[in-house]
Amino acid sequence: MDEDQQVPEEEQHPTVTFVPVDPDHEPAVSQPSHVAGIAGYALVVDRGPRAGLTWVLEPGTTTIGRGPDQNIFLDDVTVSRRHAELTIDEATPPQIKDAGSTNGIYINGERLDESALQPGAEIIIGKYHLILVRGDG
């Protein structure tokens, strides 16, 4: 490579391939349908980097990934820049869809391209184990 050429940002930090291992783990959120203080749905980091962090989900589509332009930023090389999209619509259950990621998304231990979600669902994105919760507010 010529000294004057710049390596594009997306080639500087490639996504690392990662397959989650499911050791028998009970979610930290014991009653996901009755979480106090949250109106609507939220994602809680159950295990992995930033455990305990919670994002309240607004109606519409929320993007999830390692890219700084994503609505939910998961800073780890096992997460693709644009990893998944989660859609909240009052008329239907929440939906999650893989956005063409390297490592895919796992819902309750099964690798899926897309899925409807229920409160208590475990979503694995890279090293992050997230729980979908519904508040009582």
Image: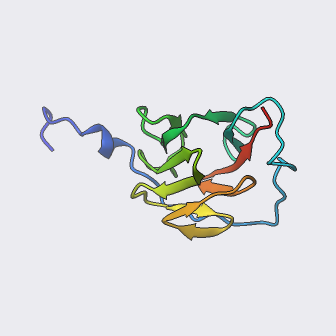
Please tell me which residue lies in front, 22 or 110.
Answer: 110
What percent of the width, then of the height, locates residue 106? 60, 63
What percent of the width, then of the height, locates residue 56? 65, 33
> Does 125 sit above or below residue 66?
below
**Side of 72 relative to 109 (left or right):** left
> Does 6 sit above or below residue 17?
above
Q: Is residue 46 visible to the viewer in this orientation of the structure? A: no
The number of numbered badges drawn on the structure is 0
- Residue 68 occupies which quadrant of the picture? top left
Quick one: quadrant of the N terminus? top left
> Does 24 sit above or below residue 41?
below
Quick one: quadrant of the C terminus? top right
What's the residue at 62%, 52% (across, down)?
127
What's the residue at 82%, 66% (across, down)?
24
**Side of 7 relative to 70 (left or right):** left
Please tell me which residue lies in front, 113 or 37.
Answer: 37
What's the residue at 73%, 45% (across, down)?
133
What's the residue at 53%, 68% (across, down)?
112
**Side of 69 relative to 49 (left or right):** left
Q: Is residue 114 visible to the viewer in this orientation of the structure? A: yes
> Does 16 sit above or below residue 109?
above
